[in-house]
Amino acid sequence: MDEQADKRVLAEEGEEPSDRPKEGRARKGTPDAAFDLWLQRGLHAMYDDIAREPIPEELLRLIEQDRTK
């Protein structure tokens, strides 16, 4: 969605469009917030199982060896 479309959506919701950067507009109910929520849920669905896996012993050993140098 382009910036003009963002302003139209905000106007329809009764908010005043502003010239603030997109980062300042990512509130609940805006297109940016919906995308952020979709992205967060998608990334969690794909990577939570991987993030919970234990760190391999070989990698821990290499990290510990590097610390001692």
Image (cartoon, rainbow, N blue to C red):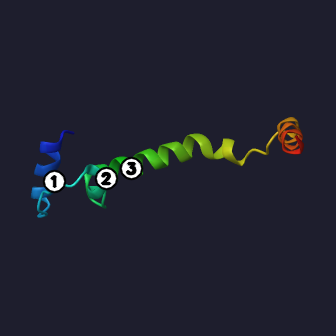
Residue 19 relative to residue 32: left or right: left
Q: Amino acid at mark 3?
A: Asp
In this view, the residue in front, 27 or 63, is 63
Residue 43 relative to residue 36: left or right: right
Query: Residue at 13% across / 50% down in the picture?
Result: 7
Figure quadrant of the C terminus: top right
Q: Position of residue 60 (x, y in %)?
A: 85, 42
Residue depth check, mark 3 versus mark 1: number of the one nearer the observer: 1
- Looking at marks 2 and 3 on the same chain, the residue that comes earlier in the sequence is marked by 2
Q: Position of residue 56 (x, y in %)?
A: 83, 39
The residue sitting at the front extreme is 69
Q: Position of residue 4 (x, y in %)?
A: 12, 43
The residue where tag 3 is placed is: 36
Quadrant of residue 64 within the rendered picture: top right
Relative to 3, say whether 37 is above or below: below
Helix, strand or loop at label 3? It is: helix
Query: Residue at 27% across / 59% down in the picture?
Result: 29
Query: Residue at 83% across / 37% down in the picture?
Result: 59
The residue where tag 2 is placed is: 23
Callouts 3 and 1 close, C-beta under 8 Å? no
Helix, strand or loop at label 2? It is: helix
Query: Residue at 75% across / 44% down in the picture?
Result: 53
Q: Mark 1: few, some, or many residues within 10 Å (few <14, many ≥20)?
A: few
The residue where tag 1 is placed is: 19
Callouts 2 and 1 close, C-beta under 8 Å? no
Callouts 2 and 3 close, C-beta under 8 Å? no
Q: Amino acid at mark 1?
A: Asp
Relative to 28, say whether 67 is above or below: above
In this view, the residue in front, 19 or 2, is 19
Q: Amino acid at mark 2?
A: Glu
